[in-house]
Amino acid sequence: MTIVLQSSNFLNSSTSCRKGFIRANINTPNNQTYKISLPRLQKRARLAQEQELISVFSTSGSPIEKQISPSRRSDPLVIEKLYAIKEAVADRVEMHRNIGEQRSQWSSMLLTSINGITLAAATMVGIAASSSGDSVLGLKMSSTLMYLAATGMLVAMNQIQPSQLAEEQRNAARLFQALYNQIETTLSIGHPLSIDVKEAMDRVLALDKAYPLPLLGGMLEKFPSSVEPAVWWPQQRRRQPKRVNDNWNGWNGKLEEEMKEIMGVLGRKDQEEYIRLGEKALKFNKFLAMSGPLLTGLAAVGSAFADHSPHGSWAAMLGIVGGALASVVNTVEHGGQVGMVFEMYRSNAGFFQYMQESIESNLTETEMERRENGEVFELKLALKLGRSLSDLRNLAAASLSKGEEIDEFGSKLF
């Protein structure tokens, strides 16, 4: 608001005539503008607006609360249950990590011990074959006993496969950690449901079954008749809760077609490739597991009959060469961690099966509002496959145009 103050137009006007000149003094108008603010009026207007907003929110609820259905309201009991599951999952993460480190140490210590015993026995056979006297019998008996001990230890070690046991525990710790992070995300976002509790419980039990801790009675089969992908998720997949006013949910016909093509690529290329590699690793591991004890057993027989006779010299050679070959086989099998490689291939095949089932569960859900958000699901899939969104779409387009003749694998991570 402005107030204009104007003085008189002409003040002190005077004229004088002096010596023929006319002189006039004229004062120009004096206009001044003053700005006067009214803070009290503005403050009162803001207070009135705030009071009006508070009254609207208190009577009708916030816009966010309006979008949340009554079934999505926070339940203190549900939150308490999720925290209990979260604590149990954290304990399992630590447990599997500790046991994984322990079994990894088993592998290295047993490998060193068995190789040391085998090479010492082979050395004794060589000394016994080249010497004479009363000490020969003692050397022969010592080498034979050491070979028999190495054979028994190798049978036990090949049966439990410590490197494979360690890999199982590492996978279990990683998957339990992922479940822990998912529960944390659910709690941080808020509004957990009882179905979230059930899903978390099912996943914990499925992981316990897929990666058991005990060795006796519950250990996974180390030499199965066929290679099956590892399964660590519940077979009964839960349905997503309905979202209010979300009929589209990020899905469209083009995205569904892309997901179908990617699912086909993962099944035809990635999963089949890792199953094929797993079968090769399993066959190689079986051969090594049978060869090691067989060689130490033959070496034990040769050391028992080693002497200076013609037949005894061949027996001594069998004892020496058998022990040396057994050390090589043992080093390749357990030093090279062939069992761990087989478990890694089996786990990777299970990962691609899990991705296929995740895509299929969303595509088979007829109610769009019950699906996981399409854009978020596409982003998660791209990250898990080590691709960008544009790269993922290009893969789907290549699969659509080439079909089964496509040479590209779905995953770029492994």
Image (cartoon, rainbow, N blue to C red):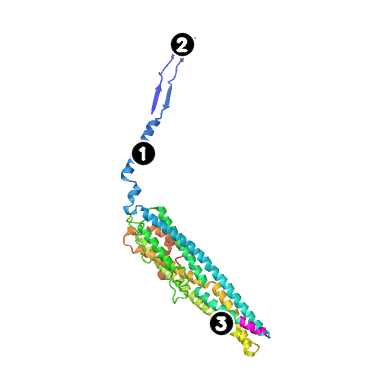
Q: Which residues are magenta?
A: 134-142
Going by the picture, which residue comes out furthest to the top?
19
Q: Which mark is residue 351?
A: none
**Which comes before the other along the chain, label 2 or label 3?**
2
Which residue is found at the position 52% from the left and 71% from the top?
162
Q: Main secondary structure of the magenta part?
A: helix
Mark 3: amino acid? Gly
Q: Within 10 Å of the Cα at label 2, are there few (<14), some (14-19), or many (20+) other Cα atoms? A: few
Q: Nearer the viewer, mark 1 or mark 2?
A: 1
Image point (64%, 79%), residue name: 123
Q: Nearer the viewer, residue 341 or 301?
A: 301
Could you say where residue 293 lies in the image, as x and y percent from the top left? 54, 79
* Rendered position, 376 above or below 224: above
* Mark number displayed over residue 297: 3
Location of mark 1 (residue): 50
Q: Nearer the viewer, residue 292 or 411?
A: 292
> Which residue is denoted by mark 2 in the rendering?
16
